[in-house]
């Protein structure tokens, strides 16, 4: 078998490099598709759950402020209004927790939530 000329060797090396770069591009495309799927899942399921938790945190903070306000009010009407607002916030927290539990994604998350809810 005769030795390859410099042109043939350069052509072979170039072909190997083109094939390798095409493989790298294909791998990057597959990885990018995976990232796109994860970001879509995050947008659809995880972000609403985080928003629910922030709504609960805000409602708990407002309830604590209303409790403080209830200790400081001087008229029965103000106390009645404050207690009604606390009841509304309690209902909001309960409804949000039900929605949070309903939309949990994994079994591990459901088990963790049940452990917290039981406590």
Image (tube, helix red, strand yellow):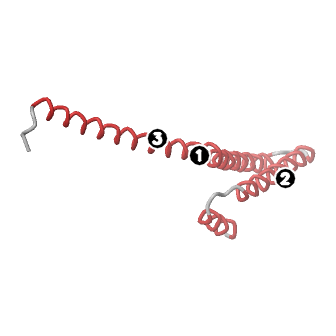
> Is residue 96 toward the left or the right of residue 9 in the image?
right
Tag shown at residue 52: none
Which circle's residue, 1 or 3, is located before the other in the chain? 3
Cα separation, mark 2 vs mark 3, equals 48 Å
- Characterize the local packing of mark 3: few (<14), some (14-19) or many (20 or more) Cα atoms within 10 angstroms: few
Cα separation, mark 2 vs mark 1, equals 33 Å
Q: Position of residue 53 (x, y in %)?
A: 66, 50
Q: Secondary structure at mark 3?
A: helix
Using the rendered view, name the quadrant where residue 97 is placed. bottom right
Q: Nearer the viewer, mark 1 or mark 3?
A: 3
Q: Vertically, is 113 above or below 28? A: below
Q: Position of residue 48 (x, y in %)?
A: 67, 46
* Pointer 2 residue: 87
| Residue at 59% from the left image edge and 46% from the top image edge | 42
Q: Vertically, is 84 above or below 116? A: above
Using the rendered view, name the quadrant where residue 81 is placed. top right
Q: Secondary structure at mark 1?
A: helix
* Pointer 1 residue: 42
| Residue at 78% from the left image edge and 56% from the top image edge | 94
- Characterize the local packing of mark 2: few (<14), some (14-19) or many (20 or more) Cα atoms within 10 angstroms: few
Between residues 103 and 56, which one lies in front from this camera angle? 103
> Is residue 43 toward the left or the right of residue 4 in the image?
right
> Is residue 43 toward the left or the right of residue 2 in the image?
right
Contact check, label 1 and label 3, Cβ < 8 Å: no
Total numbered labels: 3
Q: Position of residue 88 (x, y in %)?
A: 84, 49
Which circle's residue, 2 or 1, is located before the other in the chain? 1
> Is residue 89 toward the left or the right of residue 110 in the image?
right
Most distant residue in the front direction: 1
Which circle's residue, 2 or 3, is located before the other in the chain? 3
> Which quadrant, please, contains the N terminus?
top left
Tag shown at residue 32: 3
């Amino acid at each position: 078998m005769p030795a390859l000329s410099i042109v043939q060797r350069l052509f072979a090396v170039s072909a190997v490099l083109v094939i390798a770069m095409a493989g790298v591009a294909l791998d990057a495309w597959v990885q990018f598709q995976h990232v796109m799927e994860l970001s879509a899942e995050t947008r659809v399921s995880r972000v609403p759950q985080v928003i629910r938790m922030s709504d609960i945190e805000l409602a708990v903070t407002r309830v604590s402020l209303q409790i403080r306000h209830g200790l400081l009010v001087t008229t029965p009407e103000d106390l009645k209004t404050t207690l009604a607002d606390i009841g509304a916030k309690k209902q909001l927290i309960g409804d949000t927790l039900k929605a949070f539990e309903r939309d949990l994604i994994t079994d591990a998350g459901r088990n963790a939530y049940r452990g917290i809810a039981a406590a």
